[in-house]
Image: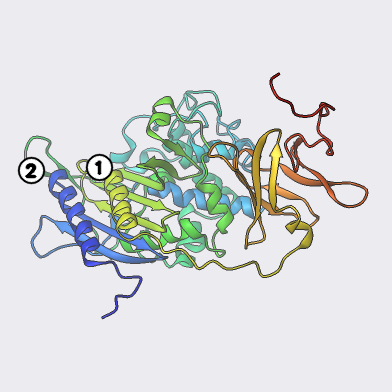
Amino acid sequence: MTTPQFDLLPGTRRALVHRIAVAQAEGRAPSLVAAVVRDGRAVWHGARTSVEGHGPDEDVQYRIGSITKTFTAVLVLRLRDEGLLGLGDPLEKHLPGTGVGETTIADLLAHTGGLAAESPAPWWERTPGSLRPELADVLGERPLLHPVGRRFHYSNPGYTVLGSLVEKLRGAPWEEVLRSEVLQPLGLDRTTVQPRSPHAGGWAVHPWADALLPEPSENLGRMAPAGQLWSTTGDLARFAVFLARGDDRVLSQETVREMRTPAAPPEPADVVDGAAYGLGLQIQRRDGRLLVGHSGSLPGFLANLTISVEDDVAAVVLANCTSGPHLSEVGADLVAIVAEAEPRIPEPWRPMPEVDPEALELARPWYWGTQAFALRLTADGGASLEPLSERGRRSRFRANGDGTWTGLDGYYAGELLRPVRRPDGTVDHLDLGSFVFTRRPYDEEASVPGGVDPDGWRGIS
């Protein structure tokens, strides 16, 4: 009997069940539900519960807290892609009168706007949103605690402001814009602002006794764009596929890649931990694996979404307790279990559909001074420049159609790579942001800045 490639092996499935069973038991969660995504689809769902015969499945809603921020970031980037705003625009340009107008849109997305972490008392997560009807009630009298753009400081009010920005530019409530522009196109029918049955109840677990206390479930009002949503492992599995691959009905692959790129200066402790923040997404390096996603919590609920784009594996974990299991660790472990037990099978190598002779002329070793690099053409029509030793700068490039190339990542991101030709049409050297790459180390026949000693290379004597 042949096992379809999208099915997980029995040993892998058992390891996944074991991991969530340990998390639910040791974390003392009333219930915990999880899903794993591979190759663009959910391949496993699992659940553990303290209530006999009432195990949740992929259709049961849990509150997802700050994973809501990622949805809000998607709405803002849609506005940017449509040309209605720029990430470098100050907030004041589009939403005047907030008192934090010098903060840019990018600063708000990346939590570098200097805003306070929370709204003024009383604690917004356990009190009605009606207590904070206006942005001024959310921001308070001292909304800025740090210089704009200087440090990462997680801010719930910052995403409340972004939600208000969406409402201003769309002329409709945040909830309606989210439903029509993201939830409906992606088929996320079980992601809602208010809970819809079946849904889990939120609980607090006593720290020193196996006893429960129900948590209130408040409508967050203005704070909704920072943490209001309810969702399921089924819906969040589909959302994970979107964040990894993009969907032109919502955001392009290029834009979701931008979301996954670090955008905030990390705190010193974050550098040690390998943690960063992009545009509405958390980024972490764990055991050599780059993970993106977001965590969430509100009284009575914990949530985590973890994606390894390179492995094409994602995990969703939801629990209905205020504290207990460390879901970010559980999500990372679920990804690692699948990625290590059943490594991604690469696509077959295929040659380029056609070859540009002028581009092919560049595919060879080049030297920046004495350091050797290789320029390679790729089947997607791009190129890569990589050091031949283990150390050195490396970047991918996009062809511009006029014989030049633009860097896509690394040190040379945005820089222009230009072949400089002699009168006879042959390539003298490559100019990359003023750096000269020659066919030989300090090629005496090429235009090397500063010239080359006419006596050439020599020994020590």
Front residue of 414/80: it is 414
Q: Secondary structure at mark 1?
A: loop
Q: Residues within 10 Å of mark 1 (few under 14, many from 20)?
A: some
Give the residue type at disc 1. Answer: His
Q: Nearer the viewer, residue 220 or 154?
A: 154
In this view, 390 is above or below 100: below
Specify whether 277 is left or right of 424. left
Residue 163 in sight in this render: yes
**Picture coordinates of residue 61, whole percent (x, y):** 28, 59
Considering every residue shown, the one lying at the far right of the view is 423
Residue 63 appears anywhere in the view: no
> Residue reaching furthest front?
461
The quadrant in which the N terminus is found is bottom left
Element type at mark 2: loop
* Numbered label attached to residue 326: 1
x, y (%) of residue 154?
Answer: 43, 34
Residue that label 2 marks: 211
At label 2, the amino acid type is Ala
Q: In percent of the image, x 16 and y 57: which residue is there? A: 48
- Per the rendering, the mark at residue 365 is none
- Residue 280 rendering spot, x and y as whole percentages: 47, 45
Going by the image, does 438 lie left or right of 60? Answer: right
Quadrant containing the C terminus is top right
